[in-house]
Amino acid sequence: MNTKHKIMDYSNFPIFQNISAASMERMLACFHVRQCTYAAGSAVREYGDGGKEVGIITDGTADLVRIDYGGTRTILEHLETGSIFGEVLAFTVQTGDSISVVTEGGCRVMYMDYDHIMKRCENACRHHSQLVQNLFQLVTEQMQQMGQRVEVLSRRSIREKLLCYFAIHAKNGAFTLPFTLSALADYIGSDRSAMMRELRKLRQEGLVQVDGRQVTLALQRQAG
Amino acid sequence: MNTKHKIMDYSNFPIFQNISAASMERMLACFHVRQCTYAAGSAVREYGDGGKEVGIITDGTADLVRIDYGGTRTILEHLETGSIFGEVLAFTVQTGDSISVVTEGGCRVMYMDYDHIMKRCENACRHHSQLVQNLFQLVTEQMQQMGQRVEVLSRRSIREKLLCYFAIHAKNGAFTLPFTLSALADYIGSDRSAMMRELRKLRQEGLVQVDGRQVTLALQRQAG
DNA sequence: AAAAATCTGTTGCACATGCAACAAAATTGA
DNA sequence: TCAATTTTGTTGCATGTGCAACAGATTTTT
């Protein structure tokens, strides 16, 4: 929607690390790179068309959201600036579900074709391989995020999911949630009210302290 | 343990696709590639040392398993031949947990250093970039698997988890489980007995048919 | 072939969780 | 600034799920 923005300096993006400005220009055409800007809360992309595009969030944040046949909402991935996504990379739509990328604030996304990345480059872009290497790095990071995701989701109870999530994200005992508590429930794959209930227990037991989106973990009491 | 095996023909591995035998030999040294063979049921690797190795299952299958402080077992990933794993890629150990790679049958694994892959190659391996590209492909595939994982785990009930898992794996309505029913419970992150109970319901409702590891999905009844 | 180990299948029970529904607080938008 | 919307926080209730414990079937090992 919103299309007015200053000309981007692509060279700062991790994906173009160690690639000269000249090569970059050539590659932008070669990979069919295009950049789109989206308004807040809009759907960037519906999964299911089988398109082999790779998107990179170059500005803002977004969520990869699934709504199942019953209307249950699940945040499959939380995408920060620099995150990459795409049907080729992960998540294919199951029957009855809908998967889409939803922006949080305004958001800018760069797309390129997966096939062009994987094909040997006929136009002799000297830095093609560097780009693949950079992409490899990005995918690796994304994969680690996904790993954390599985770590959390695979816990048996809401309590354990919360504690696991907190443990992963807390830097020296505290951190700020990247989304609302409601969204957190969608993220850990459980009912919101049930999560609130469990959160209250954790608070009452003095294990965590929650003030808005600020979460503080209590230090482990010493034994003896 | 078991070390007697015929000399491997690396050139068939997807990771060495489009790389000449000569280059390959050079790279084996350059990347500190080493191959290990493991006996059935043994622990290939304990996570937590922060080692930046990437492992590739070149023969056999294995599971990436987490045991939490309470002894609850969870299969984080099921690794088929060709799968890659490593702490750099996904899953870092949380306090109180142990994560390890456990072979199913006998298993052969090739290791290489992540840092060597990401560094510009001083030894001028001409095919370094091709290997990165191949690795990129492998990581992408692994990521899709992980995506399926999240798809299943993020479902709210055992019933939905099972149906989702079945839907993903069934080719024209039927498939064979890659592991035991007990392991399936560990994989979908729920209690075995509870899963059996739910499985029985699904069977009674005529939605699925389970015979050993063979799973058959009932066709959707026509409306009207 | 016998013994050991694992896997399947089941049950009772306590309790955690999902669901629906509501009110108050906070945030967003006009 | 007021209205609309979203978020937080809570509760009752039905039921789904984890846990423990067991017996029989199956597989693996010796």
Image (cartoon, coloured by chain):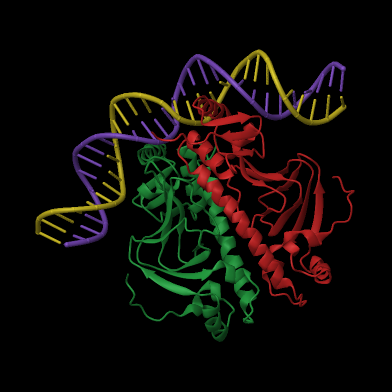
Chain colours: A red, B green, C yellow, D purple
Q: Compared to A49, does B116 lie above or below?
A: below
Position in image of residue B11 (x %, y %)? 51, 79
Residue furthest toward the front? A224
Residue A6 or residue A125, whichever sits in front: A6
Q: Is residue B220 left or right of residue A141?
A: left
Above or below for B224 versus A118: above
In the displayed structure, A89 sits above or below A180; it is: below
Residue A112: x percent and y percent? 74, 61
Q: Position of B191 compared to A45: left or right?
A: left
Image quarter of residue A126: bottom right
| Residue A32 left/right relative to B2 | right
Q: Disc count in the image?
A: 0
**Left or right position of B168 against A176:** left
Quarter where residue A177 is shown: top right
Q: Which residue is drawn at 85% across and 56% down?
A: A8
Residue B93 seen in the figure? yes
